[in-house]
Image (cartoon, rainbow, N blue to C red):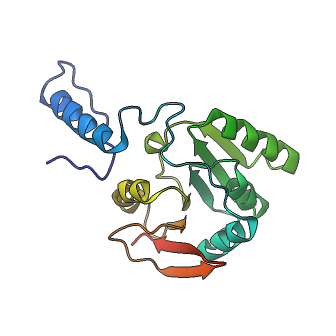
Amino acid sequence: MSRLTDPPELKATPDGGPEAAAQGTEDRAFKAIRGPWAGTPHHLDAPFWPTPEPLVERMLDLAGVGPGDHLIDLGCGDGRIVLAAARRGATALGVDIDSERIAEAEAAARAAGVEHLVRFRCEDLFATRIEDASVVTLYLIPLVHRLLGTRLRTELAPGSRVVGHAFAIRDWAPRAHEIIDRREVFLWVVD
């Protein structure tokens, strides 16, 4: 049975046998949901909408981000969440498909003096490995949150926190839900 909630795992067989055929079917189904140019430059899974600074701080407060945490911001935009996590002593990784946003984020990290705590990568957020994160942050669109939901619950360690701005993750009850200046913030904890 093909899972459409997560990007398919990459499995290669020497002869390109049944696993390769199944992989191709899953990949085509996933691309049908995301669009034919998914994960390529200039095809954004979500537009760049900056999270207001007070909301960034509240998101990190809800997740209890501090020293010892490793935060991954999927769709990091200009890096503001990553930088705020670093100012709290956490290490952080920001990923975005838009190279201009990554350049802005790297410049902001240098200006803030936290480049030793952060990294940024220009890549498809669905290709980003997340298992080492203790906190994942999201401000994408409902479809992308839905597509990431199962992956977040299965790949993150128990106790990991996921914080989302604006959109819920369908079929996952949040541990906390707040409305701040008419904007929603959700906290989920992996069981």
As displayed, is residue 62 above or below residue 113? below
Question: Seen in the image, is 28 located left or right of residue 87?
Answer: left
**Nearer the observer, 31 or 25:** 31
Q: Residue at x 51, y 53 (%)?
A: 132
As displayed, is residue 64 above or below residue 2? below
Residue 188 on image: x %, y %: 47, 72
Q: Residue at x 73, y 44 (%)?
A: 105
Quadrant including the C terminus: bottom left
As displayed, is residue 5 above or below residue 33? below
Question: Seen in the image, is 46 located left or right of residue 169?
Answer: right
Q: Is residue 179 visible?
A: yes
**Nearer the observer, 88 or 44:** 44
Q: How many marks?
A: 0
Write down the quadrant of residue 88 in the picture. Answer: bottom right
In the rendered image, the residue lying farthest to the top is 15
Q: Residue at x 58, y 53 (%)?
A: 72
Residue 168 on image: x %, y %: 44, 69
Residue 89 on image: x %, y %: 75, 61
Question: Seen in the image, is 34 located left or right of residue 72?
Answer: left
Residue 47 on image: x %, y %: 56, 48
Write down the quadrant of residue 23 in the picture. Answer: top left
Q: Residue at x 35, y 33 (%)?
A: 36
Q: Is residue 8 visible?
A: no
**Nearer the observer, 24 or 156:** 24
